[in-house]
Image (tube, rainbow, N blue to C red):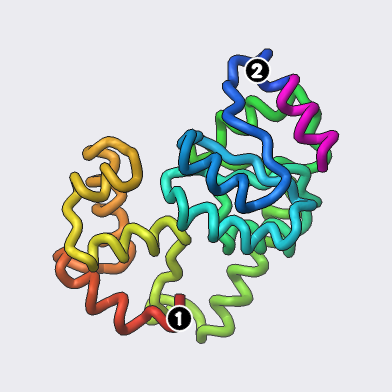
Amino acid sequence: MRFLRECLAEVLPREGLLIAGLFSNLPEALAGMVENQPDIVLLDEAFPDGPAAVGQILCAAPQILVVAIAVAETVEKVIAWAEAGAAGYIPRTASLSDIVPLLADIKRGKQACSPSVAAGLLRRLSNRGAANGGNGGHRNSPPMLTARETQIAQMIAAGMSNKDIARHLNIGVATAKTHVHHLLGKLRLQRRGQTASWMREHQDRQ
């Protein structure tokens, strides 16, 4: 929505945020992201096929945090964006003054949500656990990876070092090492060399 883009472009710099660009279509946005390497991309929920666009954005620039904005805060909407790889969302009920604090939280790995959404997410996880036969079935199910985790797993499987991954994602080596450590722990792997086999066995489920 043009009005929303231009409004944010006028307001956010007053809060100390630098705007790298405004884009109305995905090809232009992808080119701008690769060139400017922003920390965060705000993606309007009204953007055509927005969740699919998240995957394309992360493939072009995996280090970027994609935040869906003006989201109708329902369980289905929130889960759809999360499963697409969005780092967080800003509900359509948020005021302009709420946006910067919400973005700061998302960058720190936090996400505020309504009690109804939190309850709905718990119900969804509970139902999935029951469908998998309880806790035992859940433990035996392969972990689902986010788009970013999949990208890192593919780089590890390709034989890239932590330094290579850091350079590719434009992050520090220590941060890359942390991501790799967490990923191996999530996959229950002892050595990074096992990642390629894990990906071959489970890629159809990701």
Residue depicted at 65% across the width and 60% down the height: 51
The numbered mark at residue 21 is: none
Which quadrant does the N terminus fall into? top right
The residue wearing badge 2 is 13
Report the residue marked by disc 1.
205
Determine which quarter of the picture holds residue 54: bottom right
What residue lies at 67% left-to-right and 46% top-to-bottom?
Answer: 43
Q: Amino acid at mark 2?
A: Pro
Residue 69 visible in the picture: yes
Q: Position of residue 157 (x, y in %)?
A: 23, 67
Q: Earlier in the sequence, mark 1 or mark 2?
A: 2
Question: Magenta stretch: residue 196 in it?
Answer: no
Say which residue appears at 68% left-offset and 22% top-offset: 12
In this orientation, which residue lies closer to the viewer: 7 or 134? 7
Q: Quadrant of the C terminus?
A: bottom left
Overall secondary structure of the magenta section: helix
**Cα–Cα gap, marks 1 and 2:** 42 Å
What are the residue bounds of the magenta stretch?
Answer: 1-10
**In terms of secondary structure, where does tag 1 sit?**
helix
Image coordinates of residue 170 in percent, x first then y, are: 34, 39
Q: Residue at x 28, y 61 (%)?
A: 155
- Asked if the magenta segment contains residue 7, the reply would be yes
Question: Which amino acid type is shown beneath numbered disc 1?
Answer: Arg
